[in-house]
Image (cartoon, rainbow, N blue to C red):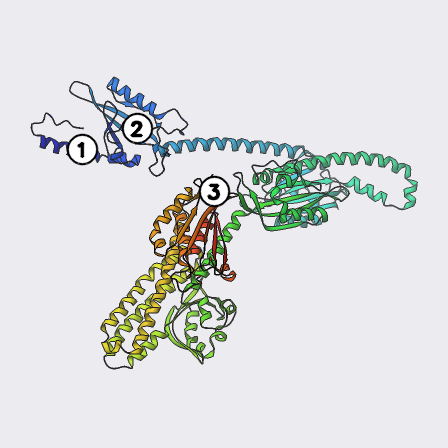
Amino acid sequence: MTDFSTSPNPTASFNEALSFQKIFEAQNNPILVLSPSLKILGCTEAYLNETLLTREQLLGKSVFDAFPDNPEAGESLSSVKLRASLQQVLASKQAHQMEVTRYDIPDPNHSASFIERYWSILNTPILDERGEVLYILNEATNVTEAEKSKKNLLESEEREKVALAEVEQQRLRLERLFAQAPAAMAVLEGPNLEFKEINDAYQQLFPGRKLLGLALFEALSELKGQPIEEIVQHVITTGETFEGKEILIPVARYKDQPVEDIYWNFIYQALYDAQGKINGMFIFALDVTPFVEARQQVEKSAEDLKALNLELEARVERRTQEVQKAQADAERQRQRFERLFMDAPTAICILAGPELVYELVNPVYAGLFPDRELLGKPILEALPEIGHNKAYETFSEVYRTGITHEEPELLIPFTSPHGFLEDRYFRYIQQARTNEEGIVDGVLVFAIEVTEQVAARKAVEENANNLRLITDSLPVLIGYLDRSRVYRFTNKAYEAWFPIKSEDLLGRRVQDVVGEKAYNNTKGYMDRALAGERLSFEATMPYREDFVKHIKTDYVPDVRGGEVLGFYTLVTDVTDQVEARLKIESSAQQASAIAVELAAANEDLRLANLDLADANQQLTHTNKDLDNFIYTASHDLKAPISNIEMLLRELQVELPKESLEGNEVKVIIKMMQNSIDRFKKTIASLTEITKLQKDHDRAAQTVNLKDVVQEVQLDMQQIIASHSAQIEADLRDDAMVSFSEKNLRSVVYNLLSNAIKYRHLDRNPVVRISCQPEDDYVVLVVQDNGLGINGKQQKKLFTMFSRFHDHVEGSGVGLYMVKRILDNAEGKIEVESTVGEGSTFKVFLKRAQ
């Protein structure tokens, strides 16, 4: 950027230029320095931060080579606008402010990809003494967020306009429906049930009375004291709809006139405000007095019927006309209810005939299947997936028997618009529709999709299962007792102490399980825990005559809303430590130093148990926070276990040589070291599961399966050679899968390493790897000639901490993690195995689109 050729002191000029360069690069604004030939000579750190590039990627390059156009931007070429501005600056030798321009930058993490960016660009010339352009400063301000906000605001305003127009159209439609309906309708609101709206048909029932603005029992005062008053009160109190048929309600059609005996068919339905509280009532009424009176006349004696036969024929004619009119009215009402169905917030459809053809589908129901045409099609043609599902069986049963069927939660897999089969859950009611003769001619369906609720519940159940797996893996007795001192939860560790399954302990009293002697040793502590006190104590527990344990116990009260509902118990076996301490205390005087060290070790163990108790309490109360529990268990336990191991080594150094050579001391030290090793293995396994929990949501990408297998073979080259293993790979070059590359490497590595690890001792391991397409999957097949697995073991193969061979080191979490990785990526794994011959694993990976 600086020419030093004319400087009398080149070194000083160089240092000065270097200082100015550092000052320039430290500027807060993103600035490029361009030559007149538009090559990049310098840039600020702010510019590098905004463009996600390094100085080495920019300096010396043409600005258009460093920032190519995004071919998918969908706008006029950004580089053309920039070039025009720079040319204008070179020609006019004046600064030029460009309008806000979209100019996407290369994505450093994805080749041939771009990141959307909007810039406010100011191009400023720097002139030499002769007025010629020496440099151009390109200052680019990132205004992406502001531009995106403007775009989102405009789109939101457009959606709001469309929604308001639709709402207004629906409102006008409902007003016309209400006003023109042939049946009498009225809306009453407020605590006194004032007439807020009535249609013409309702006013014609009472042509001589004022109704609007008056309370129901003020406008129609003669209704007070009649049974109708109790009916109204029941509807607005309970919200239950009341339907009356041919009910006699004496009422006057004109004010201050005698009441008339009028028979009514009516529906009273509660209305709700925005808070869901009842604030009124909707009335749908028909005056059926002429029909009732006609029927009463017909029911007179047979002699009267004969005498009035001629008159009856005339009445029949009139009745025919009335029936025809009533049928027309009914058709209009049917259309009105159809419109109500269409506007209902619940998914509703009507299926007609034995083939269950879609006759009516409201928008909410159509929204469940936005990519499908429903109206006029049989349900099996529109939704072929239900052909072998219980849903179609119940449709047929309802149509055949007329009995309503309700399904609270049914799994119905449907093919998505992308061609994938998706599990969807529905709650629905199937109700028969009958014609005038009472014969079933269709099925009415009310449906709600509950897929998200089911997924949430299953996630909770999975967390509960994971909680059970983790607590069962800990070498600590973990339980929960309620106020009656009855077991409500126990982990698998109980089975090693008591001859009963852990699940069979639930519902049993603690004294019936541990025995009266052991119970009496801890009863006082239980009383204190149920009083709300948190305790930590040691006790000797004579569970049985031949089974006495020294325990370290923590009681953690379960306090909710100020009330103790029970308490958690964490029992650690410290028999080895106590017996060791007792033996050391009874030895010679030099063992006093050992006793001090053991006391410190026991104190560290007590602190470790307290940490474990806190972690378990948090896990018990919040099984949604499973990851946090695993993290606490795998990290907080490392320090105390390491301390115990260090103290044990110090103890071995401090002990006299003659004491170390004693058989009893050797046995005690070996027992303590074995306990530490078991704890460390458990912590290591929990750490692996923590990594799996953190990595399970890695984004899928298109991965070449053959490349990944070859890379894993190279990583395992030393293991393969050391075991004289033979790998036979037959993979297609175009086997592309949609998967996290890191997770796929983990899956392949686990399968190959297991094939070599569990080799048959009488032959060298041979592993055959192949792949084949199957539906939407690419199936990776890994076949070995190893030890094999029997049928009973195969059922537990993918569970946590499952191990079937003790001659090989392992934690039993490898295949568990493989299955979890595949489940999270919508894949699956299958195994076929014969003992003594070998195993074949099939891994189903989603095929890349």
Left or right: 54 in relation to 350: left
Q: Is residue 498 visible?
A: yes
Q: CA distance from mark 2 to mark 3?
A: 36 Å
Query: What whole-number distance in Å separates the C-alpha atoms at marks 1 and 2?
Result: 24 Å
| Residue 504: image location, x then y, percent | 52, 68
For disc 2, the marked residue is 65
Please tell me how crowded label 2 is: few (under 14), some (14-19), or many (20+) other residues with Cα within 10 Å: few
Residue placed under numbered mark 3 in the picture: 847
* 222 sits to left or right of 118: right
The one nearer the camera, 217 or 773, is 773
**Which quadrant: the N terminus?**
top left
Residue 765 position (above or below residue 147): below
Is 559 displayed left or right of 635 in the figure?
Answer: right
Q: Position of residue 787 (x, y in %)?
A: 45, 60
Which callout, 1 or 3, points to the residue nearer the camera? 3
- Which residue bears the numbered disc 1? 21
The amino acid sitting under disc 1 is Gln
> Looking at the image, is mark 2 or mark 3 earlier in the sequence?
2
Name the kind of residue labelled 3 in the image: Arg
Q: Quadrant of residue 139?
A: top left
For the residues carrying marks 2 and 3, which lies nearer the camera in this image? Answer: 3
- Is residue 615 placed above or below 156 in the rendered structure? below
